[in-house]
Image (spheres, rainbow, N blue to C red):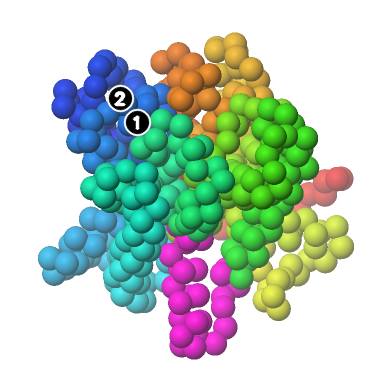
Amino acid sequence: MSFVILIGVGAMLLMLPFAHRGELSLIDALFTSTSAVCVTGLIVKDTPVDFTTFGHVIILSLIQIGGLGYMTAVTFLAIMRRKRLTYRDRLILKESLNHPGMNGIFRFLKIVFASIIIIELSGALILTLRFWSDMPLGNALWYGLFHSISAFNNAGFSLFSDNLMRYRGDFVINFTIPLLIILGGLGYLVLLELYNFRRKSLTRLSTHTKLVLWTSGIMILAGMAIILSLEWNNVKSFGSMDIGEKLLASWFASVNYRTAGFNTIDFSTFSDSDLFFGTIFMIIGGSPGGTAGGIKTTVLALAIIGVWFTLRGQNNPHIFHRSLVPYQINKAYAVIFIASFYVLLSTVILNESEHLHFVRTLFETCSAFGTVGVSTGNGGVLSYSALFSDVGKLNIIFLMLMGRIGVFAFTIVIVGKAVQTRIKYAEGRVII
């Protein structure tokens, strides 16, 4: 409900006459607000052209609050005001931050805020210095801050109509933006563990952190390999680039495939095979406790581990010399199944109602569900969603909200929690 209320307030603020230029329908205001709060980056209005500076401030504020989480932000303000929190408040905060326990949660929250400020300001400084060569210092400061916050929160909103395509061969942009995206997508718990491990105050990284780091690294490299192999000779995309540009473009696209909506190349030029593989990466998304969406890297890792040990006929799955709880693996299977159902159902509905290119519709659906934001475009500077009817846009809004909250949590809200029972039936044998 906090996300829904925040989206509604954001839409009303964007509807104010001094927040936008030209006409702005309610559905487009809701779409933009949802995309910002759910840190997605899909746009049906040209951000730098159709919104004023006040509108940009609203969008950036929604990105920051949405990336952190409304409950986390409110709780931090309550702590700063020295307001006493109930046990229920602490429990909500624990779930919002994906913190493993109740102990030290306030200290963890303060470290999260400090980390966010340091990382975003550092990114803003680097980007400002880079943009300063292209624009006056005042504009460079604003552009640097906006893109740093948008990148760290995995939002993908840009103040350039062509996103970052003009910086396709720029090393500073192509490493600063992806680094901010990766840091935001790893999760605050992972960042804290890495910091403590570097300071020698932690002797061993947790299984969660190792799994996140390994899976994230493999996904980025795999994405690069797939993009390069499928687009290397594609004259519409990579064909005219030199080797250095191809590597930079594939690196940038691979990072953004999973978590954020920035682009340095037109995705509409990609082959259908590449777009299809892209949908898989987008559904996976980032890691728990961060600013990214999707089913999460840990879910993929747990499912693969479960399948591997099942194929080997073993019932004691483990990784990094640590056993894994069977319920977690079963939960990973459930998340993948439910996510696939939602995505396929939405894609079929959109395909039948909008009558557009199927693969591009699937790509847009997965981008919304994974709160990614990359898009094949509407033929101009807007996302493919700009071609959808109001009903189609509502479908995308629903997917963005679901992806930000989490598919498992969202489904539990709909079906309700399971009723505990003491009854256990006799085992039934089923042939597989």
The three-letter amino acid code for the residue at tag 1 is Thr
Report which residue position mark 2 lands on. Answer: 50
Q: Which residues are magenta?
A: 183-209
The three-letter amino acid code for the residue at tag 2 is Asp
Q: In the image, is 72 to the left or to the right of 223? A: left
Q: In the image, is 423 to the left or to the right of 224? A: left
- Judging depth in this view, the residue of 165 and 389 nearest the camera is 165
Q: Position of residue 165 (x, y in %)?
A: 51, 37
Q: In the image, is 130 to the left or to the right of 370? A: left
Q: Position of residue 324 (x, y in %)?
A: 66, 69
- Asked if residue 223 is positioned above or below residue 115 in the image, the reply reads above
Q: Residue, x 36% and y 56% (percent of image)?
A: 129
- Asked if residue 285 is positioned above or below residue 98 in the image, the reply reads above
Q: In the image, is 301 to the left or to the right of 24? A: right
Q: Residue, x 50% and y 68% (percent of image)?
A: 190
Q: Secondary structure at mark 2?
A: helix
Q: Are marks 2 and 1 in contact (CB under 8 Å)?
A: yes
Q: Residue, x 48% and y 16% (percent of image)?
A: 388
Q: How many angstroms separate mark 2 from mark 1 (CA)? A: 6 Å
Q: Position of residue 185 (x, y in %)?
A: 49, 56
Q: Secondary structure at mark 1?
A: helix
Q: Residue, x 49% and y 16% (percent of image)?
A: 387
The overriding secondary structure of the stretch rendered in magenta is helix
Q: Position of residue 114 (x, y in %)?
A: 31, 68
Is the N terminus in the top left, top right, bottom left or bottom right quadrant?
A: top left
The disc placed on residue 47 is 1
Q: Quadrant of residue 54?
A: top left
Q: Quadrant of residue 329?
A: bottom right
